[in-house]
Image (cartoon, rainbow, N blue to C red):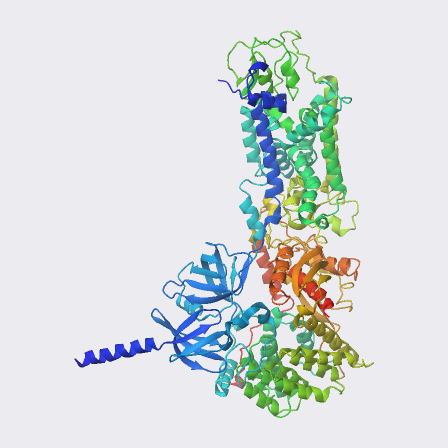
Amino acid sequence: MRLNVFLPFRQKAERGLGRRMLARLGPTWEHAPLRRGIQGACLALFLWLFFYVCWPYTAQPARVWGGWLPLRVDAATGRVFAEAEQAPFEPVPREMVVYVSDLGSGAPQPLGAFRVVDAGGRRLQLQPVEVPKAQRLDRLMTSFGPWSLHEAEPGAWPSHYADELAAKETLAAESFLVLDPLVSLSTALAGRCWVWSLTCAGAVLLGCLVVPRGFCGYVCPLGTLVDLSDWAVGRRVGRLRVGADGWWVRVKYFLLLAVLAASLLGVLLSGFVAAIPVVTRGLAFLLAPLQTATERGWHQVPSPGTGQYLSLALLVFILGLGFLRPRFWCKYACPTGAVFSIGNLLRLTHRRVASSCIRCGRCVEVCPFDAIKPDFTTRATDCTFCQTCGGACPTGAIQFVPRGTRADWKQPGAPPTGNPSTGETTIGRRGFLAAGVGAVAGVGGGLAAASAVGRGPFPDDRETRFPVRPPGSVPERQFLQLCVRCGECYQACPNNVLQPLGFQQGVAGLWTPRVVAEWSGCEPSCNNCGQVCPTGAIRALALEEKRAARMGLAVVNRRTCLPYAGREDCRLCADECTAAGYEAIEFVRVGTQVDQHGNPVEGSGFLAPVVRPCACVGCGLCQTRCYAINAKEKGLLTETAIRIEAGPGKEDRLRAGSYVERYQRRQRRGSHAPGAPGRAADGYLPDFLD
Amino acid sequence: MRRLVWLMVFILLSVSSRLAADVVELTSGSKLTGRVTARDANAVTIEVTFGDRTYSRICPIERIHAVTIDGKREILRATETDSSPSGASTAPQPAGKPGGGPTSGPTRTPAQVEALIEEQGRTAPDWWDSVALEYPRTLDLNWPVPPPRGWDNQRNVGQYVWDVVNPNPRKWRSGVRLMHHLLAVHENHPATQRRVMNELGRMYGGLLEDYARAAFWWRKAEVDRGDAYLGNGVRLAECYWRLGNKQMALDLMSRQRPQFAMIKLWGDMGETDLALRLADANLRGAYGDLAGIYAGDACRVGGRNELALKYYQRVLAVRVPSQQAKARVERNQQRARANIEAIRLFQMLDLSRVPDGAYRGNSPGYAGQVFIEVTVRGGRIESVEVTDHQEKQFYSAINDTTRKIVRTQGVQGIDATTGATMTSEAIINAVAKALGAAME
């Protein structure tokens, strides 16, 4: 059985048009176009997932069409004919289900759900989704409008961001991240728990038994980016080139060892070096701001901090390694690649060279992974099955076959080298030394990071000590063990509520997401961050759960808050909270003046905000508004007067279980505080008045 | 044979009634065919049969284009007048309806109003059982007046209601329950009971808009007899009007001493002249600022914007006294200024008085100022553009609202874009400001 997918070598004279065009693209395209095609498709898919599926701003709130007047209701079918005062800007789509609300008599009255049967211009026909009951039909008949048509049931909690992501996720947005086996291995080890993406890692490792290291050759978007950068930049600078052999060729194993050792100690380092997190975060910090700037305006781009610069430097460094050798990172340094290299030991298929090899050396020349030994046999742990060599071989001696396939294979150590050890760099003394140093450095770094957890450089600063985490984040210690710092949540978060920490929490917190409520508040209709988190550091909560998940508590600064300080009326925070549907901020009148009889003076004093801890989930919308208007726009304050604080007692971080239940418990407790007497209430009309 | 004749007669009758079916033609263009059962200055009631059901539909007169009764067609309003429907719908409409209730809602006879007050006032509201009795443990239920030891809204009932209950709609119902509780507690203290009943009237009427119960409790407190308690007699009159009988309200007010609250209520009821007469008599008094504000509001409700401006201007002209009235006068002047601006910008905007050109304006939105530029040519808004903003959630507001302004050729009656209300409103306000400033 042959598993060849390369195009067999052809003499120049015989090449057809397709061949010639491929040749123009380059030798790797000419010899193994399928591989290059898949690589390109995977990169495109990765970019599509990141820049389209994760991009939240295609979501629109449920639409409302106002100003409809009922013309006629067919009593037999309940079909309604209605007319608008003006033709709507956006036509009501046919077949859509709309909820009709009657605004004719004070408070809006629901008239039920209708399917739009016909719509055009100012006219509209609606068919009830279910046959209306007598009372509803009566109301329908007697209604004079105006009506409003709602895409979502009026009064329902908005869900447009969550719905939009769910609709776009035909393929999970975090697909590539969960395919990176190092991501799930290291997080599972560090968190000492089952991580759901382990199954994906297992699947991809199984797949790579058939296509050994195929992930690196075909799928990995970082690899493809490295290829691109090598082609665009790397190959033009020859001065820095190094040989194919040296101490560096096993760095990837040392890095893998370090990552796994640190994970065992509960410190997650894979975010620094694992392929997919590195490239995802690179895009999140480099191209995502550009996308925001062009699509939504520069004012929407948060200014980058240490974390962003460091991550970008890392990406540039990795791409820059291409000056040394093409795909230097992938071949020698990538610990994710190392996982696959080790997996290759169990491979079911491999590359073999027939004895008809004429030792022309073309294969060595084209191999992008230095996976061909000087005797033209295969370095099994490096070969990515890209099959470029097969296409380049003028005699067809290179074959990709299941292991154990019998044929007239070339023997190892056969000429030209004649050296049975095939000239491979042995691990040797230096290698052992390097491995030791690598492991010790990894573990040491891990320990240092671990000791920095929760101790940060500014232990007095509550904000950095207890960063406000995304809704549904697992308890902090486990969160740091599970968060792989990929940056996917930053892209999925509308308005960049989530932004990366720098070193405020020490190395341990680097690149982890926190809520920057000063910048923007968490959208009530969104649960994206948990949906795209590949490791479960942020739980994938349903929207009902998310809106009950308490990420912090709003705290009013009574010295600066404008009404408390007696400066002026301000109800920004409370209005924002009510509009969002949480209703967690109430008022108390402060500074009431009294006339000579002791009666309060009408209109004196100010209404000041009071946070109801039982209802506040810490979304931060109040803080956004207070800061944006009172501090930034009007300059009345130097900082926000209402702030989201996290920490014990102010947030709920559950590894499992329901936030809704917890929220309801809190509500029940909260409704009886403060100081309700709890005695049986009296009747409406006292007996003596009857 | 006799039965057959009867049947023939019946069929003939029903056919003739079909032939003579009455028709109500609505301004929207649709027709209702049936039998007109009632007609007055406000509405036409028509019975319509669909299938095996007969519905009685009350058509407000302003929605009716024409009625045909017994074959005679009468055109009530030309359909073309509705050329700017959205503008008209939000403008304050004349509220005056002789003998009737408020613009929306039913009209009732005095007997019906009395019955409603008695019936509802004696039964608990439907939310009663779902609301718990809640108040701070520290509250002194004896409710001594005047309260001892200064201001403490966790101890003194009146101050608790003022500071904590009134500002929070969520607490209104439990506040009402607290009052009912106090009523039981003070079974043997008529003076305190009267205070509680007054408070109940104020809460039901002023907070919960439950006018029947408000009237019930105010009548229990006897605010309609003798000297009105804290002006609650006028509030009771308002209840009568809201419940559907204006005459009862007018009668009750005529029995009371003149009070400022009457200016407002007359204004709301459409009795602008009565309101202005009382206001004018007080404009030079110590409470001239208050009288001016109420008079201005009454004019606005009655659609007399020019006159409203004059009253508000007079409030601004009041000299600010140096003592305790200072805060009140300043507050009223602030209100007057805001109202003047609102009238100038929205109700008196006249595009034909805006010279051709491009005008800039700005208004605070969600996260900062929203800047717009509006172009006017030949008395028409040609374009509106958002030139700069800091908004986060603008969805489609930036295009949507600007297009709506161009299409409506004005700033009134434009729905805010869902999910981006503040941005929409900022654009509308900024355009209004730009045009208002440009108006000659």
Please indicate, yes or no, whether residue A612 appears anywhere in the rendered image.
no
Q: Nearer the viewer, residue B179 or A534?
A: A534
| Figure label count | 0
Res B142 → quadrant: bottom right
Please indicate, yes or no, whether residue A578 appears anywhere in the rendered image.
yes
On the image, the x and y values in percent for residue B143 come to 67, 80
Q: Report the side of B437 relative to B226 (left or right).
A: right
Q: Is residue B424 above or below residue A439?
A: below
Q: Quadrant of the N terminus of chain B?
A: bottom left
Residue situated furthest front in the rendering: B378
Q: Nearer the viewer, residue B433 or A309?
A: B433
On the image, the x and y values in percent for residue A159 come to 56, 53
On the image, the x and y values in percent for residue A656 come to 58, 47
Res B300 → quadrant: bottom right
Res B173 → quadrant: bottom right
Q: Is residue B386 above or below residue B18?
A: above
Residue situated furthest left in the rendering: B1
Q: Nearer the viewer, residue A535 or A655?
A: A535
Q: Report the side of A340 relative to B369 (left or right).
A: left
Q: Quadrant of the C terminus of chain B?
A: bottom right
Q: Is residue A457 above or below residue B201?
A: above
| Residue occupying image coordinates x 63% and y 59% | B401
On the image, the x and y values in percent for residue B68 come to 41, 77
